[in-house]
Amino acid sequence: MRRIYFLVPDIATTHKIVDELKSEGIEECHIHILAKRDTPLEGLPEAGVTIKTDFLAAAERGAALGGSTGVLAGLVGLRFAGFAIAGGPILGVLLAGATIGSLMGGLSGMNSGNSRLRQFEQAIEEGQLLVLVDINKNKIDEISRLIKKHHPTVEFEGIEPIMPPSY
């Protein structure tokens, strides 16, 4: 799966594009719309928190950092406490550190906008809408041509893989 981006000048054109995408067999759960704050989307599929923010990327980084910190702290703590270093306690502090790290990282990521979408902030603030569509690689050219053919004012902004996220 890949995610393609389109900048659309107005809400009416966005409605037409979403209808065309649905008629091409793309489910609504694979269409995401980002608009200026307080813009009524009138039934369009709004982008969720995981798309609007850096939640997932920050949670992953937090889990890695928390897990490694937990293991190091656990090793030091066990050594100074006089216990033999064993797998069970090490696994426990690894999981605890990773859990706490992912929670803290995810919460901090929810407070910042998606870093991959920063390049579109100015256009969105000016009233354009960003349409993100998750589709199979083999349909990218077909969908892009269809949208450009019917809506010449729409700007195709690029393609990126959905997973793994680029930090």
Image (cartoon, rainbow, N blue to C red):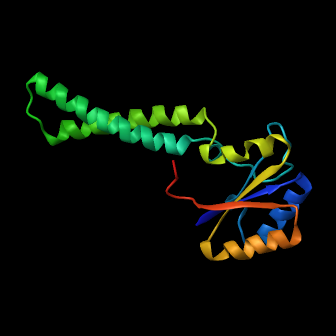
In the image, residue 48 above or below residue 93: below
The spot of residue 148 in percent (x, y) is: 82, 69
Extreme residue toward the top, this view: 81
Q: Is residue 83 left or right of residue 109?
A: left
- Decide if residue 93 is in sight here: no
Q: Is residue 51 left or right of residue 21?
A: left
The spot of residue 78 in percent (x, y) is: 15, 28
Q: Residue at x 19, y 36 (%)?
A: 89
How many marks are shown on the rendered structure? 0
In the image, residue 164 above or below residue 104: below
In the image, residue 155 above or below residue 117: below
Residue 155 falls in image quadrant: bottom right
Q: Camera-side residue: 154 or 64?
A: 154
Quarter of the image with the N terminus in it? bottom right
The spot of residue 46 in percent (x, y) is: 74, 49
- Decide if residue 100 is in sight here: yes
Q: Residue at x 26, y 37 (%)?
A: 92
Extreme residue toward the right, this view: 12
Q: Is residue 101 left or right of residue 35?
A: left
Q: Residue at x 83, y 52 (%)?
A: 43
Q: Camera-side residue: 104 or 95?
A: 104
Q: Residue at x 61, y 48 (%)?
A: 116
The spot of residue 80 in percent (x, y) is: 12, 23
